[in-house]
Amino acid sequence: MRKPKLRELGEAIKAIVKGPYTDKFPFKPANIAEEYKGFPEYQEDGCVRCGGCVQICPVKTIKMIDDPETGKRIMFRDYSNCIQCGQCAEYCLTGKGIVMTNEWDKTTLDPTSIHEQVEDELVFCESCGAVITSKMHMDFIIERLGELAYSNPTLVMHQNYENGLAEKDSGKNHEGFWREDYMRMLCPNCRRNLVFKEEWGG
């Protein structure tokens, strides 16, 4: 049997006296560096419910549900399969809707504790009834564009409705598209069909 080296023997004695060098997690909180990139976190005031993070998430941790019956858009995050890649925060439209934290452990016996959910009102096309986007997203676009928003009739009408300068109607009372439909809130498809009809008589 080979005799242990003196250095190894010294390390063994230190380990017995001082204890292990590793953290005592989970019995005590782990020491995490502030710069560590852990789980992302919704910032409800900064999120405009645009759905960009849903498109960019590689593992579909974030889901978006548009419910026409309730008129709500629900943004739902399930941390159980989040890989902490940070893409949602990196490509957030506002730069404030999702931030990265240094929290790395969400172990729990209660699945609901690792869920986050925010919602907003939907904006619908006044011609076909399709969902255009969320109200907060529309407000963000108008604020971001400033006076350039007046070049888009849908944005103008949304702002008029919000400011009480126009009243929403129950929909078109005629077939096809008329010139008056320019000043309605239309989805991109209906707006394109309207322009084609006006320009080409289709």
Image (cartoon, helix red, strand yellow):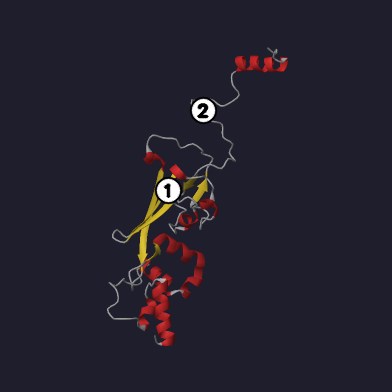
Estimate the x, y position of residue 77 in percent, counting from the top left.
42, 48
Q: Quadrant of residue 72?
A: bottom left
Q: Secondary structure at mark 1?
A: strand
**Residue that appears at 42% across and 60% down:** 136
Q: Secondary structure at mark 2?
A: loop
Estimate the x, y position of residue 41 in percent, counting from the top left.
48, 46
Q: CA distance from mark 1 to mark 2?
A: 27 Å
Q: Is residue 51 left or right of residue 7?
A: left
Estimate the x, y position of residue 11 in percent, counting from the top left.
67, 18
Quadrant location, the C terminus: bottom left
Residue that mark 1 sits on: 77
Q: Nearer the viewer, residue 160 or 134?
A: 134
Q: Which residue sits furthest right?
A: 6
Residue that mark 2 sits on: 25
Q: Against 124, is 30 above or below?
A: above
Q: Quadrant of residue 197?
A: bottom left
**Residue that appears at 51% across and 28% down:** 25
Q: Which mark is residue 184?
A: none
Estimate the x, y position of residue 125 in percent, counting from the top left.
36, 70
**Residue that appears at 61% across and 24% down:** 21
Q: Nearer the viewer, residue 190 or 13?
A: 13
Kind of residue indicated by mark 1: Arg
